[in-house]
Amino acid sequence: MRDSPLGTLSVAALPEVAGAWLDVEDDAAVRAAGASLAELHGALRGYADDGLPSVTEVEALNGQIERWLATGDRRWAPSASARLKGLVTDLPPLDDGMQLVHNDFRAANILTRESKVVGVLDFDEMALDHRVNDLARASVYLSTRFTDWRPTPDSVRRELRAGYESVRPLEPAEDRWFDALLLWHAIRAIPEESDPAGWAEAL
């Protein structure tokens, strides 16, 4: 603890991690990122904290999507929204349980060296959620950095999922949910109606 003009500060010395932001054009690094996300999910499995909301306080995924379609959809990709509505009505229950997940797994928060993941950053968005939803969200936003906000190509999404499933294959219900969740996050990622980066085209 150290004194400062603003009050007492807590100071910690942390080791330096040498690495560069994930390059999504490096297939091996993307697969390594997918494996790293699965390993992170495994490490967080079963974590409990009195400060976290209970699972019963978190709205079910199908309820979240249906509510968003009814009240939050800006209708910038109406055909995609209609497809999403059809997908959600026929999905099986997700019985894997919710757990703590990263919730912001993307290039700006992944450090790599020689196509290997050496660090995962920015855990301040963590939330209780299904692992497949975290994977779908990561698949949509993986290419994004702080000053370069572009959609993730399909080929990169496939590599990320392949890396993830090399550690933890999706269960049958998760496999069916994945496409709907991928579409949901992709629609929500469209930043504005003019969409200069082509997020709607990437759907």
Image (cartoon, helix red, strand yellow):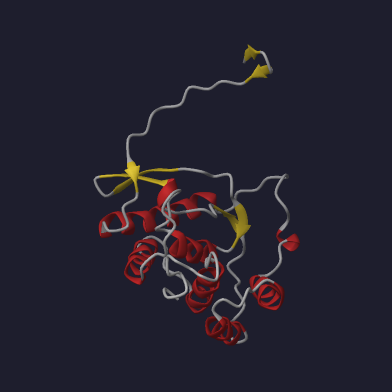
User: Residue sitting at 52 percent across and 53 percent down?
Assistant: 104
Instruction: Tell me if residue 141 comes above or below residue 70 in the rendering.
Output: above
x, y percentage for residue 120? 43, 45
x, y percentage for residue 5? 67, 13
User: Residue sitting at 42 percent across and 61 percent down?
Assistant: 150
Instruction: Tell me if residue 108 comes above or below residue 154 in the rendering.
Output: above
Residue 85 in the figure: left or right of residue 27: right
Quarter of the figure that contains the C terminus: bottom left
Q: Outermost residue toward the right?
A: 57
Q: Outermost residue toward the left?
A: 114
Q: How many marks?
A: 0
Quarter of the figure that contains the N terminus: top right
x, y percentage for residue 68? 67, 72
Q: Image quarter for residue 84?
A: bottom right
Q: Image quarter for residue 29?
A: bottom left
Q: Image quarter for residue 191?
A: bottom right
Residue 192 in the figure: left or right of residue 57: left
Q: Nearer the viewer, residue 84 or 30?
A: 84
Residue 24 in the figure: left or right of residue 114: right
Q: Nearer the viewer, residue 41 or 199?
A: 199
Q: Outermost residue toward the front?
A: 194
x, y percentage for residue 85? 61, 84
